[in-house]
Image: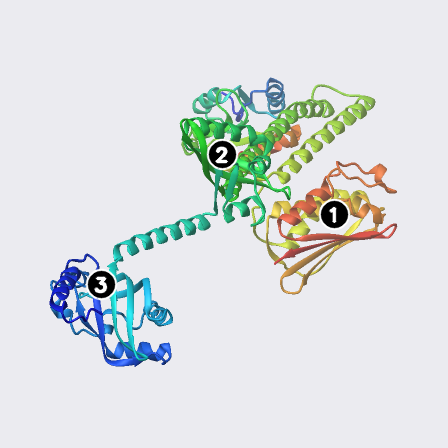
């Protein structure tokens, strides 16, 4: 039995998926990954992670689409952080309205920022 | 007249028969009182109306006035036939007097039994005895129907003229054999030809626009073969060089298959053509506008996508170098650390440039809108200062906020914060260490809030002041070598202030510092 908190990284860019997994694992989390929205949605439902890092631009099902296909009130112990390299205000307010708990510009974060972000959203 | 005693009865019978059988109206007026011919025509006419009565007439006359027999007419006064108030009748009687009481074929305006207008053509002779008019004989023809017909014709001609004038339609007629050409006054106006100037067919042809001449010749010659009516739009070139659009119609009249005469009309249709051209131009503009909007949207989408795509690899570089710098994968030597830091900084700079370009594209976009809410300007300025704390600490600079303690205003806070971050960052960058930056917030009148950012830095040359708000402008000065940037900051500042219906100005002196003044409507 693991007592580690689970973080699900939904990210289609392999280099980023790898590095985020590396950083978060080093930070002491149990890291799961998904390469698109469809896989991500399935894993949220199956694994009920504490934190979801959700990218927006993805094949098959993008981040917004995923949020539209899930009722987050069914997962009270899961926090969804949208992180993207899209930075306009319209997108931000859109994903917040869809239930995202936070919105971060991906390129602005250092590894430490990422760890702090995740920590901030944990109970 | 016929007063011979012996033949009296016989001649009287023949006379009566002649009168009664005549299809013309025949009549005799007598006077109760003879009228001296020496009187003025006016007085004579007055007396005629007063004293003349119908003494004798025939059946034709009775019918003309709507009677079935002669009897009721006998004894009727002149005024009961001839309308006294009608000037035409006055002229008629004046002419009778002037002619020496002998007049032929003069029209009178009268009324029949039922009050209907009647027109008669009269021939009459007056009998004078010793300087007195005593009676008058006359005949009359009923011309009421002809009169009505000719009046109708007159009316229709007038209507045609009116219609032609109203529609500005010109009329022409060409006698092919004699080459005589008639142009109506309106047509001359259309072609810009004087009312008395002679016109020829050649002149007409020469004024047709060269591009339309072939077509004109074709339709005309076709009509001259077939006698059918043609209609076509063409341009003319007036002698003053102006070009006008006309709608021309025409038709040739043939005799034994040969044209003898041609008639036609021309109408100026410049307004119609102008409206058509305007409509076409308008449609074109609409299309262009739609295309521009689509292009603008496409541009915005492209920039958003491009920035996203550029950021992604830079994000990966940032993460991996960070891991190395943090020695997550093992110890790093000091030299290696230094080089990694340079690579990291370079990557950061690249990310900043991407951000700046994206920001510029957003601000330039036609779809860009402010999200205004009530905010305290003093709070906003303080939070901008806080954000730049490290910058000021680095140069040991201090910042002072003066003026109002609270300044509520309706603004887009995140955009306005960007304005002050840029102004304060510039103030710090272009000032020497240990200097002071002063921000004052004041009301100017009741409707304007003025915020000024004053530094004691290197200042801006007069010739550079005008272009510092332009895109990608970087000004050379004593400190510019140490300052990095894309030259977009002040461009955003001016744009954002402008979008808030405000204005920005700068006062500066080389070596003494600069003051940026922002005025925003309250």
Image location of residue B393, percent across then percent down:
78, 45
- For disc 2, the neighbor class at 10 Å (few under 14, some 14 to 19, many from 20) is some
* Residue B237 visible from this viewpoint: yes
Residue B270 vertical placement versus B326 (above, below): below
* Residue B459 visible from this viewpoint: no
* Image mark 2: chain: B
Q: Which residue is mark 1?
A: B424
Q: Which residue is mark 3?
A: B116
Local secondary structure at mark 3: loop
Q: Quadrant of the N terminus of chain B?
A: bottom left
Image location of residue B476, percent across then percent down:
85, 40
* Cβ atoms at labels 1 and 3 below 8 Å apart: no
Q: Nearer the viewer, residue B445 or A119?
A: B445
Residue at 69% over, 47% down? B494
- For disc 3, the neighbor class at 10 Å (few under 14, some 14 to 19, many from 20) is few
Q: Nearer the viewer, residue B358 or A73?
A: B358
Q: Quadrant of the C terminus of chain B?
A: bottom right
Are dots 1 and 3 on a single chain? yes
Q: Which residue is mark 2?
A: B176
Front tag of 2 and 1: 2
The disc at residue B436 is none
* Image mark 3: chain: B
Q: Nearer the viewer, residue B518 or B229?
A: B229
Image location of residue B351, percent across then percent down:
69, 30
Front tag of 1 and 3: 3
Of marks 3 and 2, which one's residue comes earlier in the chain? Answer: 3
């Amino acid at each position: 039995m693991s007592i580690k908190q689970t973080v699900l990284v939904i990210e289609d860019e392999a280099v980023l998926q790898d590095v985020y997994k590396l950083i978060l694992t080093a930070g002491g989390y149990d890291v799961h990954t998904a390469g698109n929205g469809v896989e991500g949605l399935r894993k949220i439902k199956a694994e009920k992670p504490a934190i979801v890092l959700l990218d927006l631009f993805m094949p098959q099902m993008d981040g917004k689409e995923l949020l539209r296909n899930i009722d987050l009130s069914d997962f009270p112990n899961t926090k969804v952080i949208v992180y993207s390299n899209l930075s306009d205000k319209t997108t931000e307010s859109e994903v917040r309205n869809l239930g995202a708990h936070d919105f971060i510009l991906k390129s602005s974060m250092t590894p430490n920022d990422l760890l702090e972000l995740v920590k901030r959203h944990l109970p | 007249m016929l007063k011979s005693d012996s033949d009296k009865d016989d001649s009287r019978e023949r006379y009566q028969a002649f009168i009664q059988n005549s299809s013309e109206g025949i009549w005799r007026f007598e006077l109760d009182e003879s009228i001296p011919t020496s009187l003025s025509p006016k007085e004579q006419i007055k007396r005629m109306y007063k004293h003349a009565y119908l003494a004798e007439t025939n059946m034709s006359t009775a019918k003309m006035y709507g009677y079935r027999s002669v009897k009721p007419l006998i004894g009727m006064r002149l005024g009961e036939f001839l309308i006294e108030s009608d000037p035409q009748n006055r002229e008629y009687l004046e002419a009778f007097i002037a002619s020496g009481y002998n007049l032929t074929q003069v029209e009178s305006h009268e009324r029949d039994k039922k009050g209907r207008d009647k027109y008669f053509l009269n021939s009459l002779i007056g009998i004078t005895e010793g300087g007195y008019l005593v009676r008058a004989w006359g005949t009359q023809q009923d011309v009421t129907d002809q009169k009505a017909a000719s009046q109708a014709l007159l009316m229709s001609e007038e209507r045609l003229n009116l219609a032609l004038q109203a529609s500005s339609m010109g009329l022409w007629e060409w006698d092919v054999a004699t080459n005589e050409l008639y142009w109506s006054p309106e047509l001359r106006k259309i072609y810009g030809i004087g009312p008395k100037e002679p016109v020829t067919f050649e002149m007409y042809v020469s004024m047709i626009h060269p591009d339309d001449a072939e077509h004109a010749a074709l339709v005309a010659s076709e009509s001259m073969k077939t006698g059918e009516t043609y209609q076509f739009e063409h341009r003319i070139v007036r002698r003053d060089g102006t070009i006008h659009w006309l709608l021309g119609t025409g038709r040739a009249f043939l005799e034994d298959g040969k044209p003898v005469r041609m008639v036609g009309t021309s109408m100026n249709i410049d307004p119609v053509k102008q409206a058509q051209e305007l409509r076409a131009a308008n449609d074109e503009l609409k299309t262009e506008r739609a295309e521009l909007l689509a292009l603008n949207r496409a541009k915005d989408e492209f920039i958003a996508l491009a920035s996203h795509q550029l950021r992604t690899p830079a994000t990966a570089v940032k993460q991996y170098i960070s891991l190395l710098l943090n020695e997550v994968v093992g110890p790093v030597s000091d030299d290696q650390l230094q080089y990694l830091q340079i690579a990291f900084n370079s990557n950061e700079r690249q990310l900043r440039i991407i951000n700046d370009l994206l920001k510029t594209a957003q601000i330039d976009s036609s779809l860009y809108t402010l999200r205004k809410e009530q905010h305290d300007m003093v709070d906003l300025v303080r939070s901008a200062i806080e954000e730049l704390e490290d910058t000021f600490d680095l140069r040991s600079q201090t910042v002072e906020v003066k003026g109002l303690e609270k300044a509520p205003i309706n603004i887009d806070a995140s955009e306005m914060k960007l304005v002050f971050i840029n102004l304060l960052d510039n103030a710090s960058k272009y000032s020497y260490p240990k200097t002071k930056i002063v921000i004052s917030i004041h009301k100017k009148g009741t409707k304007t809030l003025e915020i000024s950012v004053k530094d004691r830095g290197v200042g801006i040359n007069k010739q550079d002041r005008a272009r510092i708000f332009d895109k990608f402008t970087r000004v050379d000065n004593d400190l510019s070598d140490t300052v990095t940037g894309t030259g977009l900051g002040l461009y955003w500042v001016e744009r954002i202030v402008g979008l808030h219906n405000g204005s920005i100005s700068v006062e500066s002196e080389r070596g003494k510092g600069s003051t940026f003044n922002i005025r925003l409507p309250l």
